[in-house]
Structures are given as structure tokens and as C-alpha cells.
Amino acid sequence: MTAPTVVILAAGHGTRMRSAVPKVLHPLCGKPLVRWPVDAALAAGAARVIVVGGPDRALEAVLPEGVTLAVQEEARGTGDAVRAAEDHIDRTAPVLVLQADVPLITPEAIARLVQAHEGSEAAATMMTMELEDPAEYGRVLRAPDGSVVRVVEAKGEGDAGADELAIREVNTGVYAFGGDALLDALPQVRPDNAQGEYYLPDVLPVLRAEGRTVAAHLVDDPGVALGVNDRVDLAGARALAQQRIVDAHMRAGVTVVDPASTVIEVDVEIGRDTVVEPSTFLRGSTRIGEDCRIGPLSTISDTSLGDRVCVVHSLLTGSRVGNEATIGPFSYLRPGAVIGERAKVGAFVEVKNSDIGAGAKVPHLSYVGDAEVGEETNLGAGTITANYDGREKHRTIIGCRVHGGVDTAFVAPVTVGDDAWTAAGSVVTEDVPPRALAIARQRQRNLEEYRGPKDG
């Protein structure tokens, strides 16, 4: 297969999304719509990828390095959009044109289209599919020999007649052209339609009029070419994409107990023999090791988990968890939380920007923020690190093998030495030496025969 130039059209407004966000920037399983065809083209071995966007250059921030953004100054149709990219097109190579709102196109489908195009020796090859309800898709008109005569648009009243609207084979908006054929034909396209736009499919009759062949490549799976026009379409594409993602993980050795209630975004990595329980959401750049048990009812975002980690009924974001650690139930790991191997973060515990050492335990009902907790330390229930003085955050340093009493508050900045103890109910405001017992509470007084305040 000759490495093609790939042009991805992404300049449309997407008004049917009813959104201030450009349509192709709406997320699909953790990645903007436009990135799906871009990544598929790169994976298929494209020599060059050009994305055509609007003059606001809103897409620039989400495109990977090496992908070119071409600007269509005014939205005047798909033909005009390709002309905006013509300075970047190699005349001597195949040119693929994809739509940015067709997110489920695969590298394999792209490669098969290029191979079909090169095998047919046609000037253009269009990817087509058959739909029970073609709706506004352009209808494909074929000649008796099976080649394509033209595509009849069906976007507006008067674009197509009744016989043409009855055709079920439709244009997917995905094409392969010879580079020279495409660039020579584009200037001959005219805006002879209800919208007054320059349609890329109108290149096809120009090529036929020159005696050149236009071929069609019918795909078996319409899902690879389904477009997203509104939020209903986006939900449908998300369901298909999510099924692909979950199926791939299960085939790689991951158990997903209930795929219907599970969300796994596209960049998540999961090791084999891990079990994902129902109602678990795995998002962003999350990495999960082998033989873990995740969920139920857990959300993990941009977090790294080692092997044999257990997470139950918890929320983790921007954190790192070592091998054989246990999290939950009802734990909250905030950004910067680092949980060591064999450590435990228990019920109703919040950890933020803190290191919990190997084998350490924060069993329940505690807040640990901006702190370092040494190995094998055990903090009692209700432990609080008071890290904010109203102006600045301060750190608490707790050594190894410390035994913290219940309801202990550490008022930062404070350091507790190795093997130290704190008495229950203490408010620790001064450093505690190693192997010392800190008692920081007011002495109890009992008032004998106390009857409460008198009336009046």
C-alpha cells in the first residue's frame, strides 16, 4: 500500500449539536471526535495528515505533533474545504478525504480503501454503505458497469428526486483519489445546489466527464462510517465505541462483569486477570496492573494502579497506588496522592497531595493532606492534618511505625519521629521526637452532682 496523504474535514459549525463547543471537539470515550479519524489515519500509516478547520483555529490545541492544520476561511462546503488543504497535498500519492465527525473509522478500513483504490486504477474510489433509512446521506448513483456516476445530495429540499431518495446505498464522505486527479478537478466544481456550496462529491462527475473511472468500495460494517450530526448520534457512536473498547479488554484477559454498566475510556490500560465490577468508570490516562479488583461503584481518572490492587466504592483522580494496596470503601484519592505497596486507605478517608508509605494504614474517617506518612505507620480513626493556616498550605511529616491515636489532629507544619505515639484526642502543634508519646489535650475535670443550668 502506498502511504497516502489524509485530509480530514473539520471546519463545519455543527449547529445541530446546540452547543457553544464545536461539534468535533465534543468528547467521545475520552477523546475529542476529531482525534478519532486523526489517530486512525496515523495508525494506518499515512504519510501526511491535514486537518481542515475554521479561522478560529480552535482545533489546534488537540491535534498531535506532526498533523497540519489548514484553515478554511469561510464555510462554503466540503469541496472548498479540500481546496483549503491543496498546498499540502502530494500530487503523486493517493489522497484520502475523511470527515472529522465520522469517529469510528478504523485503520483497517482506511488501509482496505487505499488498497481497493490502487487495485481498481480508478481516478477516485468512494467508500459507501447501505442503510435501511439513509436520511440525509448523499445517494450513490451507479452506472451499469458498477462504477459511480455521481452522488446526489439530500440535505435540502430539491437536492434529490423521489427515485434518488429511494436508493439505500449512500456516500460515507470517505474518498480515495489520485492526487493529481483531485487537484485538477476541484477548480471545476460549481455551487449548483440549494445551499450554494461547493460539494466534494461533485468532483466525481467532473472525472467521469474526462473519461476517468470512479469506483465504489462498499463496507460490510456501516458502523465504521456512521456520522455524528447531533447529540443523539453522538450517544449512538459512544455505545459502539464503548463496546469496541470493552470487547478488546476482555479479549486481552480482563473480566468486565457487567459491560452495560461499565465505562472505560479509550486510553485506559488494564492488565490481565483484573476484574472490573459493575458501575465502575475508568477514565483518562488510567493505568491498571494485573490481577486487580476494581469496583463496584468506583471512578478512577488519570491514575496509576500497580498489581493486585483492590479498590471498592471509591473515587481516585490523579493518584498513584502501589502493588497490593487496598482502597475503600468510600475513599477519595485526590491529585498528588501516592499510596505505597501494601498500604491501606480505608472507609471515608480523603488523601490529597500526600505520600502514604509502604504498609501504612489510614483505616477510616480521616483527612490526610499535604503530608508524608512513613512505612508501617497506623493512623487512628478521625486523624486530621490541619494543613492550611488561612494563607498558605503546610506539610506534615509523620515517620515510620508511628501509632496515631484516634481523633488526633496534626497542625502543620509539624514533624513526628519514627516509632512515636500520639494519645487519643490530641491536637499536635509541636514536633514529636522519635519513640515519644505525645499527649496534647486539656486535663479532664468532673463536676460532681452537676444538675445543669438553672431556669431563669
Image: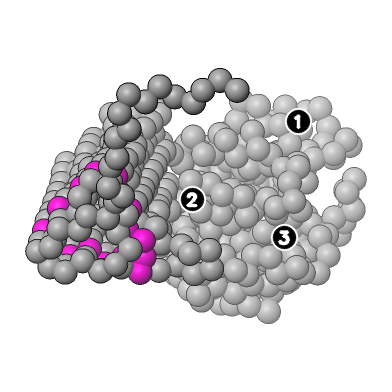
First along the sequence among labels 1 and 2: 2
First along the sequence among labels 3 and 1: 3
Q: Is residue 242 magenta?
A: no
Tell us which disc is closer to us: 3 or 2.
2
Q: Amino acid at mark 3?
A: Ala
Q: Amino acid at mark 1?
A: Leu
Front-most of 289 and 177?
289
Front-most of 279 and 383?
383
Tell us which disc is closer to us: 3 or 1.
3
- Circle 1 residue: 165
Residue 25 horizontal/vertical position (percent): 62, 55
Residue 358 horizontal/vertical position (percent): 15, 58
Q: Quadrant of residue 381?
A: top left
Tell us which disc is closer to us: 1 or 2.
2
- Disc 3 is placed on an element classified as loop
Q: CA distance from mark 3 to mark 2?
A: 21 Å
Q: Residue at x 32, y 54 (%)?
A: 427
Label number found at residue 30? 2
Measured along the vertical axis of the image, is residue 234 above or below residue 40? above
Q: Could you tell me which quadrant the N terminus lies in?
A: bottom left
Residue 304 visible in the picture: no
- Circle 3 residue: 11
Q: Write the start and end of the magenta stretch as one range.
A: 395-413
Q: CA distance from mark 1 to mark 2?
A: 36 Å
Front-most of 48 and 456?
456
Q: Residue at x 70, y 52 (%)?
A: 21
C-beta proximity under 8 Å, tags 3 and 1: no
